Amino acid sequence: MPIKPVFDLRAILPVLVMFVVTAVETVGDISGVMEGGMQREATDKELSGGVMCDGIGSTLAALFGVLPNTSFSQNVGLVAMTKVVNRIALASGAVFLILCGLIPKLGALISGIPTPWARAKLFKFAFSTIAAPDPNINTEGLLQFYNMLHAEWKGLMAVIALYPDRIRFSDPVYMDVRGGDYDIASAFGRMLFNEKDVWSNQDDLARNPDAQPFIQLIYYREHLVGGTSPLTGCFTGVDYSNLGNDASDINWYRQGKFEDPMNYLTPEEKHEP
């Protein structure tokens, strides 16, 4: 049977409120992008154009029975860090995400990119931002996340220093960066390992300029907890919450994460006088 459309104010009014909320968020995101990427305030034309675009997208969404669209606030931080505001570049990224959603194999290939390589770079960005934050960029939320990574890093370093008998380093894990142009893993490797001179064995690199870069995985009592990196020494994994009783005597391992050990170590462990 055909379904007759029903217009009920009890359903319409809450959705109207959602439209207004998403419009306000869009204004904030546009302002943040302009200040972070262009170092100036957004013009009235840019704000009205962004809100209009958001409204058109939400209207199309409503025709298909879904909720209003909203701008992606995380992109504000990306623009602030990369300074990339080119429309073609951003549109290309949007098209690529659409393709990932429509082509399951492509999405699976992207999701299969080894996490350690991405984490190594993330920790480098975190430490450099903490050491020299850009005063022109509002990175309050980003710095909070980076400080959490820094605390995890110090927690892992403390475990390596104080419990070396529980730590095992894997054999070198290599990534072949010489794959084809359309090989996602190789392309990702080339992007992350452009500092090949620090990621490769120096003796091998001296004999062979094509020596492959590598990392070593770090295991705590056979639980994977992170990896090595010449950029930061080491980095923690995304999830190492399964240590359980194996880490019960490590005071700074709480809620499945390492924390800053300086709040838990004794003066003797800190080598304080």
Image (spheres, grey):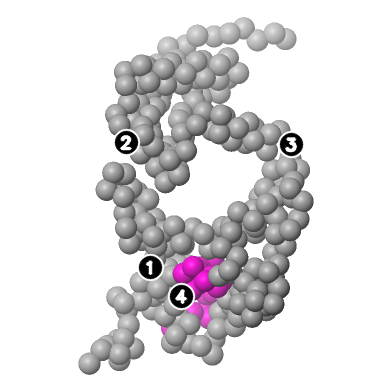
Which residue is at a point 73% across and 48% down the rendered structure image? 181
Q: Magenta segment, which residues?
A: 226-249
User: Callout 3, which amino acid?
Assistant: Ile
CA gap, disc 3 and disc 4: 39 Å
Instruction: Categorize mark 2 by other alpha carbons within 10 Å: few (<14), some (14-19), many (20+).
Output: some
131, above or below 7, in the image: below
Q: Secondary structure at mark 4?
A: helix
Count of number-bearing discs: 4
User: Callout 4, which amino acid?
Assistant: Leu
Q: Residue 10's image quarter? A: top left
Dot 3 or dot 4: first in sequence order is 3
Residue 115 image position (x, y, % from top left): 60, 59
- The quarter of the image holding the N terminus is top right
Dot 1 or dot 3: first in sequence order is 3
Disc 3 or disc 2, which is closer to the eye? 2
Q: Which residue is mark 3?
A: 103
- The quarter of the image holding the C terminus is bottom left
Q: Which residue is mark 4?
A: 156
Which residue is at a point 64% across and 56% down the rendered structure image? 190
Instruction: Categorize mark 4 by other alpha carbons within 10 Å: few (<14), some (14-19), many (20+).
Output: many
Q: Which residue is mark 2?
A: 39
User: Callout 1, which amino acid?
Assistant: Ala
Does the magenta segment cover residue 7?
Answer: no
Residue 116 image position (x, y, % from top left): 59, 63
* Cβ atoms at labels 1 and 3 below 8 Å apart: no
Q: Which residue is mark 1?
A: 151
